[in-house]
Image: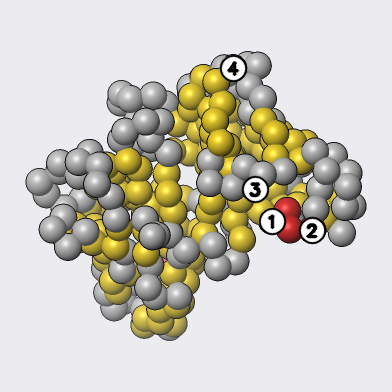
Amino acid sequence: AQKITQTQPGMFVQEKEAVTLDCTYDTSDPSYGLFWYKQPSSGEMIFLIYQGSYDQQNATEGRYSLNFQKARKSANLVISASQLGDSAMYFCAMREDSGYSTLTFGKGTMLLVSP
Amino acid sequence: DAGITQSPRYKITETGRQVTLMCHQTWSHSYMFWYRQDLGHGLRLIYYSAAADITDKGEVPDGYVVSRSKTENFPLTLESATRSQTSVYFCASRAPRGASYNEQFFGPGTRLTVL
């Protein structure tokens, strides 16, 4: 079974609108972390936001927020007021804190922001 | 330069040749990782290392060898390259549990083509 599922291969949004990128995860580890990374066309991996499994509040970083619903095992990324520069591939990832705590990635969602 | 670097950035080789991809980080992070990125698969973990001389297999280790004689370097070797190893390879590093535990930093990637 996949540990990280991103069901949206591609998303389209107009500039200045908000967009939600879906991510569901599967783990039995009580301690884990959830991450979102952005990969623009230039190829680098850019860290956006982190949510710990014990964090009571949803994480926010500027225009990015993580809608963490623990019971549903979802960790959706919300981008408010989309900008043209937000066009990129977005990856959700999970770190299970048992063992060496490696990251497992989803397959990604391509976001295109139109003027 | 501070950070994590990879070399070469681009490499074309032939089937059966040995290829080594280099990764160097200046933060003295104990954890280092190698991922490969392929369309439709996201990033998949090849090998990781918790410290010098400690390495372990990830999700897709077959055909790859790693070593870690120094904390700052984590080379990845394809002993006999195959076309299926054509991919973009990312190196990453992370501090052990502590202040920077929730950040995993990625190198710029190496695009490898095996003909």
Q: Which mark is residue B53?
A: 4
Q: Position of residue B2 (x, y in %)?
A: 56, 28
Q: Position of residue B110 (x, y in %)?
A: 69, 47
**Secondary structure at numbered mark 4:** loop
Which numbered mark, 3 or 4, is in the foreground of this view? Answer: 4
Q: Are marks 1 and 2 in contact (CB under 8 Å)?
A: no
Q: Which mark is residue B87?
A: 1
Which is more N-terminal, label 4 or label 2? 4
**Secondary structure at numbered mark 2:** helix
Using the numbered discs, state the Cα–Cα distance from disc 3 to disc 4 in whole angstroms: 21 Å
Point out the image quarter for the C terminus of chain A. Answer: bottom left
Using the numbered discs, state the Cα–Cα distance from disc 3 to disc 2 in whole angstroms: 14 Å
Using the numbered discs, state the Cα–Cα distance from disc 4 to disc 1 in whole angstroms: 26 Å
Task: Characterize the local packing of mark 2: few (<14), some (14-19) or many (20 or more) Cα atoms within 10 angstroms.
Answer: some
Q: Is residue B82 left or right of residue A59?
A: right
Residue B111 visible in this rendered orientation of the protein: yes
Q: Amino acid at mark 3?
A: Tyr
Q: Which residue is mark 2?
A: B83
Task: Characterize the local packing of mark 4: few (<14), some (14-19) or many (20 or more) Cα atoms within 10 angstroms.
Answer: few
Vertical placement of residue B66 versus B28, above or below: below
Q: Amino acid at mark 2?
A: Arg
Q: Amino acid at mark 4?
A: Asp
Q: Quadrant of residue A52?
A: top left
Using the numbered discs, state the Cα–Cα distance from disc 2 to disc 4 in whole angstroms: 29 Å
Q: Are marks 3 and 4 in contact (CB under 8 Å)?
A: no
Q: Are marks 3 and 4 on the same chain?
A: yes
Using the numbered discs, state the Cα–Cα distance from disc 1 to disc 3 in whole angstroms: 6 Å
Q: Quadrant of residue A25?
A: bottom left
Which is more N-terminal, label 2 or label 3? 2
Point out the image quarter for the N terminus of chain A. Answer: bottom left
Q: Which residue is mark 3?
A: B89
